[in-house]
Image (cartoon, grey):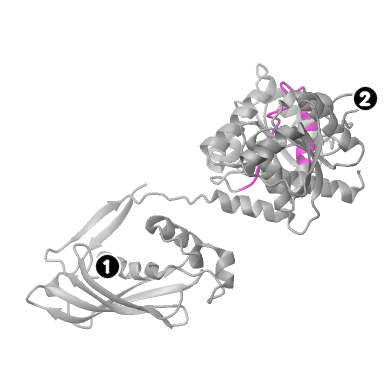
């Protein structure tokens, strides 16, 4: 909604020497990022935390002109106010401004020039300790016409989405953990090869590349991908790659499995094989782990890749798998929203009946470790406002961390929309198997594959701690 703001100024004749005005602002991390974006000033002393820590100030600092621009803000909006034109400015930067500093900007009239209606101001920006960070002068052409009115101001909403920062934060979750031996099935294109190599260089996994060796090395040479220190197991073709990769898990050479450029069915047919596969007592399911910049919690979406039209019993296992993963991701009691098109039980919509039954199963202790509610429509699950509008009283509504979709089609659409339209950071993992399986789309980037390796590594370390392997 537009904000009503009272606009007023002082004309040249209303201003006297010694008059002053001030403004207080606190430097936030978003201010630094926005200033860098708007000006193109990407000085690493301001935007690179690692560089800042090794610099002369030992912490991230604001751009000098951030403080300088606030002087202009006071002059243009407060004193003299609307109609002021900045003519000249001279500044001295006394000390740095760091994140969290509260800056008071004060402008004081030093001199007036009647011949051209200019005014010279003394300008000081001081921090919370009263120490000057910027001082100088500003000369302005003062307003000649009086402004005094209430005006609606519609300031644009700005959201800063630093996907790289979210990606880096995810990678930090496995910092200090031992890399997990991972069989990579048929990494025979650019992204499917670069992903595990990046994960290897980041210390997340120890990849074992399974596929036609000549082809893998040719791709590496074409795209300048360094394979130093990485084991390659030669395979004749994609089917052979899948079988050999699964066998490496069976023999204990690998503690995780990763899909390369082969089709999902080729890999999963070997995984589910009753003789030599990786089945457990649980139903196998897939989870998209998503960091959505417009949502306040992590989102786990399941199942959008394996189970096409799961039954009630299969959905129960899908939920159990997702809850177990949420615990490993440090979500102690995940809020599970069981999705449908509506939030009421309708005998004509099977997904609403399943949702009601699953919630009752949780009440009876058949599904443990999470807080379930459903049926919930997507808006009710992720928006507290939408839930309240519809009169839904629920601890899950508006705060869901696991979204259980009715079927693969709806789940895949939700996940892909969040990835491509909401710029979500995405990882894909298969659960309910003896080891975690990194399962991403063939169209996914190397970064998505690396992010998925982080989730697989966390699961593999949890398996080690439980003595599963």
Q: Residues within 10 Å of mark 1 (few under 14, many from 20)?
A: some
Disc 2, SS: loop
Q: Position of 394 compared to 95: left or right?
A: right
- Residue 192, horizontal then vertical, whole percent: 67, 36
Residue 300 shows in this picture: no
Q: Nearer the viewer, residue 183 or 82?
A: 183
Queried whether the magenta region covers residue 301, the answer comes back as yes
Quadrant of residue 142 within the rendered picture = bottom left
Q: Is residue 406 left or right of residue 416?
A: right
SS state under label 1: loop
Magenta-span inclusion, residue 321: yes
> Which residue is disc 1 drawn over?
78
Q: Magenta stretch?
A: 297-324
For image coordinates 70% across by 28% down, the residue present is: 305
Residue 39 position, x and y percent, is 38, 58
| Left or right: residue 456 compared with residue 40 | right
Could you tell me which residue is drawn at 81 percent across and 54 percent down? Answer: 178
Question: Where does label 2 land, which residue?
Answer: 275
């Amino acid at each position: 909604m537009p904000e009503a703001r009272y606009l007023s100024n002082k004309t040249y004749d209303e201003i006297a020497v010694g008059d002053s005005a001030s403004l207080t602002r606190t430097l936030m991390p978003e201010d630094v990022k926005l200033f860098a974006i708007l000006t193109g000033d990407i000085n690493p002393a301001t935007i690179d935390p690692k560089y800042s820590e090794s610099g002369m100030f030992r912490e991230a600092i604001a751009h000098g002109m951030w403080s300088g621009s606030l002087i202009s803000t006071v002059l243009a909006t407060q004193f003299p106010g609307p109609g002021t034109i900045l003519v000249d400015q001279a500044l001295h930067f006394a000390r740095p401004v760091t994140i969290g500093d509260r800056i008071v900007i004060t402008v004081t009239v030093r001199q007036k020039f009647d011949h051209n209606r200019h005014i010279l101001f003394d300008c000081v920006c001081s921090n919370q300790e009263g120490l000057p960070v910027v001082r100088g002068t500003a000369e302005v052409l003062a307003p000649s016409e009086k402004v005094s009115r209430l005006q609606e101001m519609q300031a644009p909403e700005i959201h800063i989405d630093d996907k790289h920062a979210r990606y880096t934060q995810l990678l930090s979750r496995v910092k200090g953990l031992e890399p997990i031996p991972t069989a990579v099935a048929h990494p025979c294109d650019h992204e499917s090869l670069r992903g595990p190599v990046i994960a290897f260089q980041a210390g997340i996994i120890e990849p074992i590349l399974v596929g036609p060796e000549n082809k893998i090395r040719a791709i590496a040479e074409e795209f300048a991908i360094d394979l130093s220190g990485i084991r390659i197991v030669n395979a004749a073709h994609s089917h052979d790659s899948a079988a050999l990769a699964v066998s490496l898990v069976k023999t204990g050479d690998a503690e995780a499995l990763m899909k390369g450029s082969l089709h999902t069915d080729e890999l999963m047919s070997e995984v589910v094989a009753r003789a030599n596969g990786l089945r457990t007592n649980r139903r196998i399911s897939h989870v998209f782990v998503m960091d959505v910049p417009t949502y306040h919690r992590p989102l786990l979406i399941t199942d959008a890749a394996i189970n096409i039209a799961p039954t009630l019993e299969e959905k129960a296992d899908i939920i159990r798998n997702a809850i177990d993963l949420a615990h490993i991701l440090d979500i102690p009691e995940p809020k599970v929203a069981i999705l449908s098109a509506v939030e009421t039980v309708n005998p004509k919509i099977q997904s609403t009946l399943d949702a009601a039954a699953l919630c009752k199963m949780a009440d009876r202790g058949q599904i443990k470790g999470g807080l379930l509610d459903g049926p919930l429509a997507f808006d009710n699950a992720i928006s507290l406002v939408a839930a309240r509008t519809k009169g839904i009283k629920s601890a899950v509504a508006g705060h869901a961390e696991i979204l259980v979709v009715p079927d693969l089609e709806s789940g895949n659409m939700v996940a892909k929309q969040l990835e491509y339209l909401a710029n979500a950071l995405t990882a894909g993992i298969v659960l309910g198997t003896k080891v975690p399986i990194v399962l991403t789309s063939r169209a996914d980037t190397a970064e998505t594959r690396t992010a998925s390796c982080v989730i697989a590594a966390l699961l593999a370390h949890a398996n080690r701690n439980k003595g599963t392997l």
